[in-house]
Image: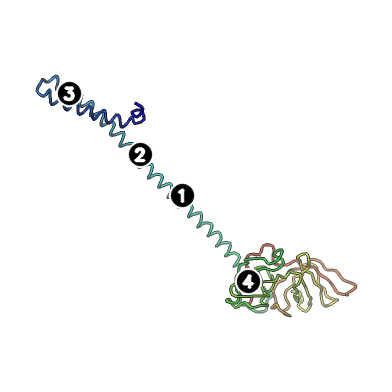
Amino acid sequence: MRWIREHKLISAIVVILLALVIIFVVSAVTAGSGNGATGALNKGVSFVSGGFSSVVKTIKDNVTGIFSYKALQEEIDGLKEENDQLKKELAETRLDREDLEQLKELSQVLNFEYTEKEFDMVTADITAMDGASWTDNFTINRGTESGIEAGDAVVNGMGLVGRVFETGDGWSKVVSLVDEGSSVSFKLVRDRKQLGIASGDKSGGISGYMMDADSTVSQGDIIVTSGLGTYPAGLVIGNVKTVVYNSNTLLKEITIEPAANFKGLEKVAVIK
């Protein structure tokens, strides 16, 4: 009985089939015994056949439902995969757009109004920092295979970043402009005869002095590389923040706001 309760549909089918067999046998035995018996038999057959058809229809509907659910689930899974692919493509498009914007910024270095010549340039991604912060040294993913050599200037879209001090196949190490050991000769944009020397300080900034004690340097002045020494002329270094006259050295000392944002560097360009 427990089996029958757990398998009601199968039990019903078996009962109907047995009923059909019994009716068929009775029909054969009572053949020709009269219209009343035949009519009753036909009604019984119709009743059982109807029940059987109902059961078959139920089974068919259930099976159809199972396959419909499977098809629906497959469609849902397909839509999920398509959605995931679209998300991936959107992310890649966003990265390409950001990369393009950085490349556009880097291309501006070729159009600085202060530069005196055109440069050959190789773009590169920063892959590692070699000091305590980006204000020290870092590594890029381009090297000798791209024609990069030690001493080449490194810039971003805003201005001078530093210089290459070591290079190999597929990599180069860069010392940043704000590193304590870096120094650069500069001139004022509004008066290119006024020269000075700037170097990185311990706080991750840039400070320097004017070589002429009578210099008219003032807050807000833009300074660029002079072309003396390692760096080519005309690369923007930054602008003057403060000016103080040192009575001991008899020189005007300045602090400089770098043009490049050293904390947000991701992509740079190497001037060959």
Q: Which is nearer the N-term, disc 4 or disc 1?
A: 1
Report the amino acid beneath label 3: Leu
Report the amino acid beneath label 2: Gly
| Left or right placement of residue 2 versus residue 41 in this view | right
* Residue topped by disc 1: 80
Which of the labelled discs sits on residue 7, or is there none?
A: none
Which of the labelled discs sits on residue 41, or is there none?
A: 3
Q: Which is nearer the N-term, disc 3 or disc 4?
A: 3
Q: Is residue 126 above or below residue 11?
A: below
* Foreground: disc 4 or disc 1: 1
Q: How many marks?
A: 4
Mark 3 packing: few (<14 Cα in 10 Å), some, or many (20+)?
A: some
Asked if marks 4 and 1 touch (Cβ < 8 Å), the reply is no
Q: Is residue 200 above or below residue 19?
A: below
* Residue topped by disc 4: 269
Estimate the spatial distance between the alpha carbons at disc 2 and disc 1, rounded to whole Å.
22 Å
- Residue furthest to the left: 32
Estimate the spatial distance between the alpha carbons at disc 3 and disc 4, rounded to whole Å.
98 Å
Estimate the spatial distance between the alpha carbons at disc 2 and disc 4, rounded to whole Å.
63 Å
Q: For the residue labelled by badge 1, is the local secondary structure a helix, a strand or a loop?
A: helix
Mark 2 packing: few (<14 Cα in 10 Å), some, or many (20+)?
A: few
- At a point 69% along the width and 65% down the height, the residue shown is 134
Report the amino acid beneath label 4: Ala
* Residue topped by disc 2: 65
Q: Nearer the viewer, residue 53 or 260?
A: 53
Q: Which is nearer the N-term, disc 2 or disc 4?
A: 2
Estimate the spatial distance between the alpha carbons at disc 3 and disc 1, rounded to whole Å.
58 Å
Residue 78 in the image: x percent, y percent? Answer: 42, 50
Q: Is residue 81 above or below residue 2?
A: below
